[in-house]
Amino acid sequence: MKDIKIITEYWGKINPLKIEDYINVGGYTALEKFVSKMNPEKAIEEIQKSGLCGRGGAGFPMGDKLGMVAKQTGEKYFICNLEESEPGTYKDRLVVDNNPHLLLEGIIISALSIGAQKAYIYINGNYEKQKEILEIVILQAKEKKYWGENILGSKFSLEIEIFSGAGAYICGEETALINSIEGNRGEPKIRPPFPTSAGLFGCPTAVSNAETISNIPWIISNGGKKYSIIGSKNSPGTKLFLLNGAVAKPGCYEAPTGITVKKLIDDYAGGIKRGKEFWFAQIGGACGKLLLEKELKAKMEFGKECECSLGSGSILVVDKSVNIHDLLISWTDFFRRESCGKCVPCREGTFRLWEIAKRFRDGEISDRDKEAIQDILWTLDNTTFCPLGKFAGTAFRDAVGKGIVKF
Ligand SMILES: Cc1cc2nc3c(=O)[nH]c(=O)nc-3n(C[C@H](O)[C@H](O)[C@H](O)COP(=O)(O)O)c2cc1C
Ligand code: SF4
């Protein structure tokens, strides 16, 4: 059966900078339906029915998040998270490059459904081209009255603003992102309160990933039930997967959730690159788990019961010619640099792990280092202020635990 395409259907088929092209393939009809035939409650009900869960990594149900903010009164905000600093992850950038109006339509519907007066697009500071694309399409959509005062002659109004971050990985975390828009240091805030009750400028706020949001127009047009039967039962829909490393055809592929890692590598990315021998795969970016060959039948989905949490959806296929020392240094160096420094276990732990990785490469690792590794990994896992600290040890722990690295 041909896979259904929700996000990538028109990639390469329409000019992303021409609003007419998007309209000609049914674009903005979901928004028209929302303002003329639905109300916010009905829209949220459909999104809940769809089972759509967040594509930013944590997999939180989108409909529930919107519902939590919708039931609150007063000033509210919707934020599209386009930070995307995870190594090997570039799906949200491709969404903007290939069909920015789909994302914009999703932002407008999501923001109106919670009663937000303003929507922000928080974009990675390095995504200069994508910022320009968004500026162009936002203007086009305003001329057509898809946002602004009295959208399409209705009672709904919405402001939209692009906010450019500095390209810090931690600013993808929603409370650090909020701090950044507020003009504070980009570091996480204590939770609770959660952004859904006290977010941007202390107001109820829904923060959603760009890919998550891009599913909304399809759900509003086709109904939540139709979406809920695509892919995995626990986390339905399609997902953008990024196949990187030693595969024949690296790139971004849209596939139903619940697909196995093996099928993605073999059927979508053309298998392992000729002349290379599979060693392991890393799932979900620099913070992701490592899977050995015997584990590749794991299904890619979200949720507590899932076999393999798919994180951002990136899969790095590592072959046996790769120098594991380089990889260990690259993982630990990334987290050392991206640690925001707010808490000691992460600020120090990431740095020490990186130092040990370098000594290991140089053949200078001591017994004390070997003991320290376990202490540092435990400390990162159990005592850091935010998930970045936890993420920092995941690949290292798997590399040791699965015998990929032997001291
Ligand atoms: C260190 C860290 C980095 C993150 N980076 C991103 C990011 O770049 N993009 C994103 O959408 N979510 C990121 N998240 C998750 C967000 O905090 C939040 O859960 C997400 O934006 C919610 O959107 P979703 O429900 O659509 O997934 C990150 C979380 C952590 C802890
Ligand atoms: S765990 Fe790391 S990134 Fe998170 S608050 Fe602590 S220092 Fe900052």
Image (cartoon, helix red, strand yellow):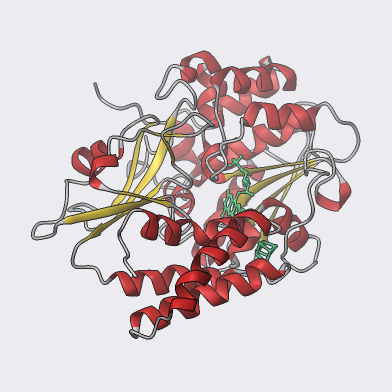
Q: Residue furthest right?
A: 74
Residue 39's place in the image compared with 255, above or below, is: above
* In the image, residue 405 above or below residue 272: below
Q: Is 48 displayed left or right of 255 in the figure? A: right
Query: Farthest front residue?
Result: 367
Check the picture and name the quadrant holding the C terminus: bottom left
Q: Residue at x 47, y 50 (%)?
A: 17
* Quadrant in the rendering for residue 390: bottom right
In the image shown, does 166 or 333 lie closer to the viewer? 333
249 vs 69, left or right, is left
- Residue at horizontal 62 percent and vertical 25 percent from the top: 32
Question: As rendered, which of 24 and 193 lies closer to the eye?
Answer: 193
Quadrant where the image shows the N terminus: top left
Horizontally, is 184 left or right of 218 in the view? right
Q: Residue at x 74, y 19 (%)?
A: 41
At 24% from the left and 68% from the top, the residue drawn is 322
Percent x, y of residue 31: 62, 28
Is any atom of residue 146 visible in this view? Answer: no
Q: Nearer the viewer, residue 1 or 236?
A: 236
The x, y position of residue 357, in whole percent, is 42, 76
Residue 300 drawn above or below residue 378: above
Rendered position, 372 above or below 1: below
